[in-house]
Amino acid sequence: MRGIILDADAIRAEAEGVNEVVDGIVRLVRIHVAYTLRLPEDAPSDRVQRALDTHVSKCPTARSLEGAVDIDWSVTFE
């Protein structure tokens, strides 16, 4: 994360998909990703915020689904 060294278990994510019937076909229409981050005490807040602000635009999965599936996310800090 923007040059911040993290432990292997410092990032967790849970994803939930929402399906709806669209034109008679069940489609995945929305994904919510809930992140839990454990950052070092000296993590620069400006770098953390920049990483969070640009997260979706840099995520290959989000970019691949762009326009087809709405993606939102939340973050909790431990």
Image (cartoon, rainbow, N blue to C red):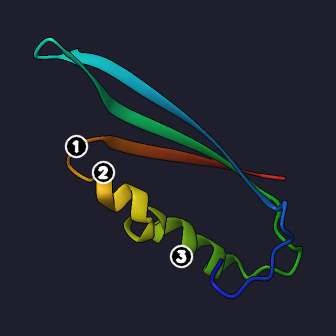
Q: Which residue is mark 1?
A: 68
Which label lies toward us, 3 or 2?
2
Q: CA distance from mark 3 to mark 2?
A: 22 Å
Q: Amino acid at mark 2?
A: Leu
Q: Is residue 64 left or right of residue 23?
A: right
Residue at left offset 74%, top offset 83%:
4
Label 1 to label 3: alpha-carbon separation: 26 Å
Name the front one of labels 1 and 3.
Answer: 1
User: Is the Cβ of the residue at disc 1 closer than 8 Å to that at disc 3?
Assistant: no
Image x and y of residue 18, in percent = 41, 25
Label 3 Cα crowd, 10 Å radius (few <14 / some 14-19 / many 20+): few
Residue 15 is situated, as x and y percent measured from the top left of the image, at 57, 38
Q: Secondary structure at mark 1?
A: loop
Quick one: which residue is furthest to the front in this view? 25
Q: Residues within 10 Å of mark 1 (few under 14, many from 20)?
A: few
x 58%, y 46%: residue: 74
* Mark 3 lies on residue: 50
Q: Earlier in the sequence, mark 3 or mark 2?
A: 3
Kind of residue at badge 1: Ala
